[in-house]
Image (cartoon, helix red, strand yellow):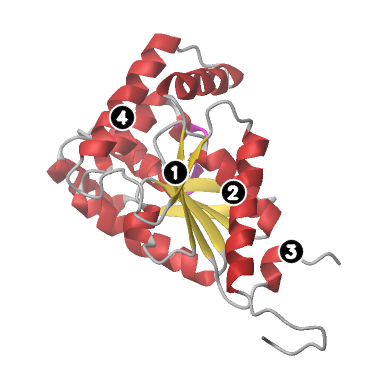
Amino acid sequence: MKTAWGDCLSDIMSVAIDGPSGAGKSTAARTAAAALGFAYIDTGAMYRAVGLAVRRAGKDTADPEEVAACLPGIHLALRYLSGVQHVFLGDEDVSEAIRTPEASLAASDVGRVPAVRTFLLGAQRELALRQSSVLDGRDIGTVVLPDARVKIFLTASAEERADRRCRELRAKGLDESYNNVLADIRRRDEQDANRPIAPLRPADDSIPLDSTGMSPHEVAAEIVRLVRLAAAAERPQSNEIGEVI
């Protein structure tokens, strides 16, 4: 049986990938985690699910009091089906429903509510403590896991991010104009960078990675390379007769 590279680590290793909406964080993190044998934890999906639940309740996602009042009734779970992470609200799989532009903006709204961040923070840290994992979001390296072994800040131009998003939506049969998607991305960038709680910014010790012009495979491969370099740098070296030096 083939052993995953992650199984060879002597302790649990966390990888934090932050960056703006549409930078390709989820795809890169999921692919890199699979290559490393790590768990993949999509924290952005958790915020999207909360935003979706608040919208469905008919509440204003930008109103902190209305959002906080919804939290006790939100039962959120991440489950792995055939190795793929699915997001559930109660018994409903909302993995597709949370990927609309409306859900994206709702996630940005609720992400500025302190009660939501407290609601999700403990769950995110607990998941990361269970096993070596890759987490992506907007404040993983700065707030959720400030001691993560590897921190990467993944970016891409707003125009490329809008183009990627349009292609994703079309593949799902959703028709959204490029200009609308670009405007939504720029608006979310502004919201995320200027929110008072955990604003989007690179951690001081993060590694910048601009994915403009790169394929998803190339981005994931670079993340895997960076993680393996970091792990190798911390591993004891041995001399020719097997002694640790």
What label sits on residue 223 in the rendered view? 2
Crowd band around label 3 with a 10 angstrom C-alpha radius: few (<14), some (14–19), many (20+): few
The quadrant the C terminus occupies is bottom right
**Residue 106 versus residue 188: which sits nearer the camera?**
188
Separation of disc 4 and disc 1 at Cα?
15 Å
> Contact, CB < 8 Å: mark 2 with mark 4?
no
Q: Which percent across, then down, holds residue 141?
A: 39, 56
Q: Amino acid at mark 3?
A: Ala
Q: Earlier in the sequence, mark 2 or mark 4?
A: 4
Residue 216 located within the stretch drawn in magenta:
no
**Residue 120 versus residue 160: which sits nearer the camera?**
160
Task: Give the residue at mark 1.
Answer: 45
Q: Which residues are magenta?
A: 90-97
**Residue 153 versus residue 29: which sits nearer the camera?**
153
Marks 2, 4: nearer the viewer: 2
Q: Earlier in the sequence, mark 4 or mark 1?
A: 1
What label sits on residue 188 in the rendered view? 4
Is residue 204 shown left or right of residue 176? left
